Amino acid sequence: MIRERLKTSKRYRKLKHLYDKHERLLIPGTLIFGVAVDFVTFRSIEINTAFMLLLAHLIVSGSTIAFMHIYDAGSRKAQETRWRYLRLAAPLIVQFTFGALLSASLIFYWFSGSFSVSWPFMIIIASLMASNDVLRHYYLKPVVQVGVYYFIIFSLFALVLPYIFNSIEPWVFLVSGVASLFAMLLYVQFLGRYLFSIRSQRSGIAMVVITIFVSMNVLYFANVIPPIPLSLTDAGIYHSVQRVNGSYVVEEENDGWLDSVLPGQTIHAVSGERIYVFASIFAPAALDTTIYHQWQHYDEDDREWVDWSRPSYSLFGGRGDGYRGFSFSNNIQPGLWRVDVETERGQTMGRVRFNVEIVDEAVELHEVIK
């Protein structure tokens, strides 16, 4: 019996030595692995399955955080059981699940909004991912772990509930916030039953959670948080858009490959010609909402963007390739233009930038089927 304990203790010390030696590689490695899992997952499985996987990550991360602190608060004898192996791996599990959950949020929110509008929220998520490695020892503090965990819970609820309710109305986001507060209250109460460190820091934890809650609501009502679950899959500027047998036939100029890749293309229009903006939007099957195209022209004299028009069309989700729609503008002026694809509240999914040059003769065009 004693020999077996010595053998087990020696094995544990060897594993701990390897962990301590390679910690700086293991921590970012688990983070990268979590990002890779997300990238493959959300490109190869259904959205409902992806949400179940995210829920599993959330449960595992919360359980691991609780286990770490309960284990550390236990007696030395209790710490010498086989649970110490799990405690040794626990930081890696937390890093992996935090990395996976944060990268999943970044993936979903990135594709659901224009970076030019939603960049503050994107940078917050990206910064949390980066600091998850750089400040890994700081992450061991209960207040920090609980704060990041709450941010993830709120982000995940705001991601999933619009799919459940098939709505992007403000009340869905408010419900997400209240549900996340309730979930965090239960979690902190559970931890407080076993940990004096949590009970003694309740005021600090409450301050962090309330700050995150208020900040998320400010970002949402300032239209910085993208309009999950909508995402812009395709958008462009064309000379003509026609619906033919369930498809859209667009006419575009014969630009080179580089022109089609670079943003801010130039479109050559005859005076009085209509210019079209076509957009394809992914949405859940039962979602019914309105999409707006905010046309703006840049005033060179005043050096500001001036609203031109804001046409709209109804969106009924369900197409795997996205719901398609378009708008147009007559008697368009030469110069810089942009068209924001927006929700009714003004949340921006994407932006089409282009320059208009007025020409005497129509340029050569070719057709593309969308």
Image (cartoon, grey):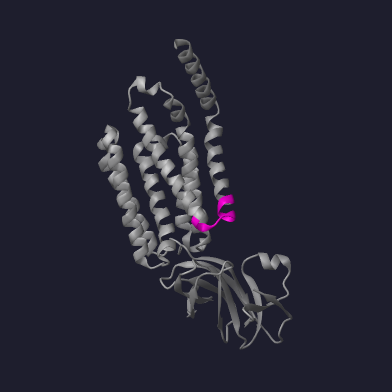
Q: Position of residue 346 (x, y in %)?
A: 43, 70
Asked whether residue 328 appears in the rendered view, the answer is yes
Tell me the quadrant of the picture where the N terminus can be found: top left
Image height of 327 relative to 149, above or below:
below
Residue in the foreground of this view, choosing between 273 and 176: 176
**Horizontally, is 354 left or right of 205 in the view?**
right
Image height of 316 relative to 135, above or below:
below
Asked whether residue 224 appears in the rendered view, the answer is no
* Residue 317 on the magenta segment: no
| Residue at the farthest top position | 2
Q: In the image, which residues are magenta? A: 40-48
Q: Going 49% across and 39% down the picture, which residue do you hit?
A: 133
| Residue at the farthest front position | 1
Q: Position of residue 367 (x, y in %)?
A: 71, 78
Q: Quadrant of residue 205?
A: top left
| Majority secondary structure of magenta residues | helix
Residue in the foreground of this view, choosing between 114 and 162: 162
Image height of 177 relative to 75, above or below:
below
Q: Position of residue 218 (x, y in %)?
A: 35, 60
Residue in the foreground of this view, choosing between 66 and 103: 66
* Residue 45 on the magenta segment: yes
Image height of 184 relative to 358, above or below:
above
| Residue at the farthest bottom position | 272
Q: Position of residue 370 (x, y in %)?
A: 64, 73
Q: Going 72% across and 82% down the picture, which residue do you hit?
A: 363
**Horizontally, is 232 left or right of 225 in the view?**
right
Q: Going 33% across and 26% down the picture, which residue do you hit?
A: 74
Q: How many marks?
A: 0
Q: Quadrant of residue 66?
A: top left
